[in-house]
Each structure stands twice: as C-alpha cells, then as structure tokens.
Amino acid sequence: MTIKAAFKVQRANFSLDVDFELPAHGVTALFGPSGCGKTTLLRAMAGLERCVGHFWLGELCWQQHKLFVPTHKRRLGYVFQEASLFAHLSVKGNLEYGWRRLPHAQRRTDKEQIIDWLGLTPMLAQGASELSGGQRQRVAIGRALLSSPELLLLDEPLSALDAKAKREILPLLEHLSAQAKVPVFYVTHAPQEVERLADRVLLMEQGRILHNDHLQQALARPNSLLYRDEEVAGIISGQLQSSLPDGRVPFLYGAENAPAGCIWLTGQEGLTFGAARLRILASDVSIALAPVIDISIVNQLPAQVLSMTDIGQGRVLLRLALAQGEQIPAQLSAYSVAQLDLKVGCDCYALIKAAALLV
C-alpha cells in the first residue's frame, strides 16, 4: 500500500508545491528549517488547509478534483506542538473522547494496552490542568491512538517540552509506529529525532521537497540538510544486550536471528535493552588498514569504502559499508586519506571508541 499526495498552496509570502509517493507504513519525518512548509503540508494532509491537489492513502481517497473529505470525516490522529487537551475533562475523559464515538467494529486499538504503554494508569482521574508538559503530551498521543486512526500526524511534539520531558517521551515515540500500526508523519527540525524515529525522510526547503529518502539515504547525502548545523552521524539498527560485569554493553547489529557483528558500548543512564538504534558521529570513527593491537579502542569493524567526498577545510567524508550493508560515516583529514592511500572500494577497519557511542 502506498501514499500518494500532491498539494499546492499560494500565499502572499509563501508557496507550497509538493508531490510525493511513499510506502504507507513506518514513520516518515518531515525535516527542514523553520518556515519551509512542514506544518502546512501536515495541515493539508489533515484537511485543515484547503488547497489544490490530491491525497490517496492506499485505496482511500481524501482529496482529488472536486472530492474533498472534511477533517472530521478523516480517520486520523493529530498531535500538536502543545497538547490540546480538553481542560474540563479528566485524563480518562480525554483518552476516551474519540474512542467512545467509534462504533465497536472500528475500534482497532486495545484501550488498556495503550494506557499501560504510555504509563497513564496512575493519573486517569486527574484533571488535564494538573499534568506536566510531558504528561499532557502522553495523553495527547494516547487520545490520538485510541481514535483508531488510518493515519497519525505529529507536529513537533517535543518542541515545547523541557529536556527531562523529552527524555521521557522519546522512548515511547520509538515504538509508536508498532503501536499505531498505521503510517506516521512526524514534523521536526531536530536531526537527533530523525535519527532515532524515522524510517523515511522528506527533506524540505522553501515549500518544496528536495529529497524523498529512506533514512540511510538521507544520512548518506553529503551536505545534507540534516547536518547543516549539526555533525554528520550514521545510524545502525540492532539489539542492545544486558551489560556485562565489567561495564561493557554489547550491541548486536545485522539480522536479529543472525547478527553480523558486535559493537561494544560503555554503560549509559536510561538504557533500554532490546531493539535499538546506535548513533555514530563521523568524527568518532578512525580508519586503519589492518587490525590494531595494543590499543584501547575495542571496536575494530571490518569495512569497505563506498564513497569519498571533499567537504572543505582539508576534510574528507567517507561512507563505509559494514557487514550485511550497514553504513556509517567517517570524517578524516585529507592528509590522513592520502597517507593511507584510501580509495573507493578499499577494505579497511573502522575504529570506534566505546565511550563515544550513544543509543
């Protein structure tokens, strides 16, 4: 099943002109600078922005030619930057608002499971005004899921939260797609959120979609919008295992039933064992042509150079392929590249300090 959409919006000082098609599953991040049209695109998908275009969700058409399904008739969940809860209702009342209005045959979510997953059971009787920012956003997510949507839209749900609340919500969002079982569109301008949550990325600028990429493709683009103000990073998916007595934490990457290799981490606060994504900064990866002995760096991963890009100021960005095709970046000086005589296709070893790795 696919999502097919095209929208045109013309205002005095802004225009949106997008046309895209992508798989109708997983999390798609809408990423770009402020004012590039991310929220306008989300509102167009929700039917809150009347515009020229079409919108198909699989075989379900919400807009085309003269057909326009109003927002209240679209089966979608929408979570805003600041949780818009009903102040006169309790947490339970907010959660059940959409759920109670659904015919039993259309209820595709387990209410008790969602409430338990979001950790809302202890606060069901509380009023919405009594909640912290993170708690309010959890209720907003729960309310959206309990409406049994065909599509879930999240507009920068972490931007109004403090650091503590963000740490509280992010692990929940990582499992949101599996809980929702519907396609999710997630607006953000934070590269770290894209890396942790997205399966696909729509990179936007000035009302246009520059690239419609799988996450790994988006990360691999030199001078990507994702890293205009941030350091280049790579993401590897795998399984985080229980820590060993010596403090090391094994991360198995590759197929779950046949891991391709192990990357060692040091213990970190708040680690959750199981499926995880490992973030590797390009500047934390060194290169050797053979395994190195008598060195404190324990992660020495066989790799092959896929590409090399001059990024200026005497620096070269390498894209490396690990076993089973996992890709990570490495940033070296042009001098080091010349000294090692590195070329595309070269076999090498990626050296990564365990203490530098973040989950």
Image: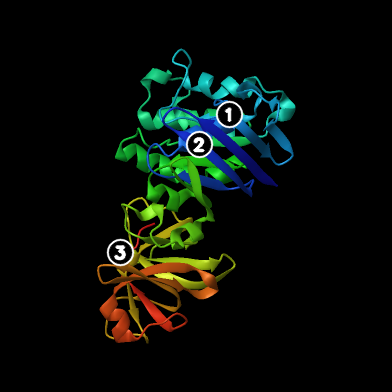
Question: Which is in the foreground here, disc 2 or disc 3?
Answer: 2
Residue 152 percent across, percent down from the top left? 57, 36
Quarter where residue 356 is shown = bottom left
Q: Based on the displayed image, in which of its 4 quarters is residue 34 positioned?
A: top left
Q: For label 1, count other residues whose C-alpha is less than 10 Å away and answer few (under 14), some (14-19) or many (20+).
A: some
67 relative to 136 in the view: left or right: right
Q: Residues within 10 Å of mark 3 (few under 14, many from 20)?
A: some
Image point 63% across, 32% down: which residue? 148
Reading the image, the residue beneath label 1 is: 51
The Cα–Cα distance between marks 3 and 1, rounded to whole angstroms, is 47 Å
Question: Residue 37's x, y, as percent?
Answer: 46, 37
Q: Are marks 1 and 2 in contact (CB under 8 Å)?
A: yes
Q: Earlier in the sequence, mark 1 or mark 2?
A: 2
Q: Secondary structure at mark 3?
A: helix
Three-letter amino acid code at disc 1? Answer: Cys
Q: Is residue 321 left or right of residue 331?
A: right
Q: Nearer the viewer, residue 130 or 338?
A: 338
Along the line of sight, which residue is nearer the eye, 302 or 224? Answer: 224
State the CA–CA distance, disc 1 to disc 2: 10 Å
Which amino acid lies under the numbered mark 3 shown in the image of this protein?
Ala
| Residue at horizontal 63 percent and vertical 20 percent from the top | 100
